[in-house]
Image: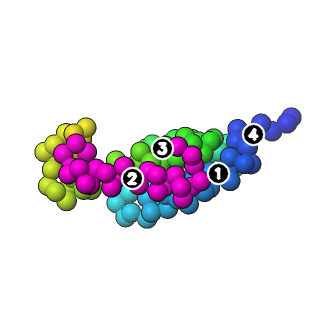
Amino acid sequence: MEKQFYITEEEQEKCRRVIDAFVELYEIEDEDILLVDAGRYGFVKLQCYTQSYGFEELDTYTDSYSLFEGLWEEWFSLNVFMLAREMQLADVLYEDLFNNLPKEKQSKLIGKKDYFAKKAGITL
């Protein structure tokens, strides 16, 4: 029986570059994020670890663009939340956190997407 591959070697390499571009995301102490190379199945993002249940969330990626978007959303949400916490905006709904940040901070956060894309070799 022939093995089925869900990701090409070329996409595996592109995904590794995306993962390397977002390395700072997994170095944040409060974040339980682990990216695993699952070989022919692609890459798996595991997060929200608890000792009793293990990882509660997982996403599987077989192309670099969707992996980039998934990691970008994770990075963006985490950084918006951290900035809001620093500014003591705890009583604001999550959906409104970004809009309550100063325009300068909003621009800086949005600009990071281009930074990560360039670092990962992704064309937006």
- As measured in the structure, the alpha-carbon distance from the residue carrying label 1 to the one carrying label 2 is 22 Å
Q: Secondary structure at mark 1?
A: helix
Q: Which residue is mark 3?
A: 70
Image-quadrant location for residue 3: top right
Q: Residue at x 34, y 53 (%)?
A: 109
Residue 51 visible, this angle:
no
Q: Which residue is mark 4?
A: 5
Looking at the picture, tell me which residue is in the foreground, 56 or 25.
Answer: 25
Q: Which residue is mark 1?
A: 14
Q: Which residue is mark 2?
A: 111
Q: Is 102 a magenta residue? A: yes
Looking at the picture, tell me which residue is in the foreground, 5 or 17.
Answer: 17
- As measured in the structure, the alpha-carbon distance from the residue carrying label 4 to the one carrying label 1 is 16 Å
| Extent of the magenta region | 98-124
- As measured in the structure, the alpha-carbon distance from the residue carrying label 4 to the one carrying label 3 is 22 Å
Give the prevailing secondary structure in the magenta stretch: helix
Mark 1 or 2, nearer chain start = 1
Q: Amino acid under label 2?
A: Gly
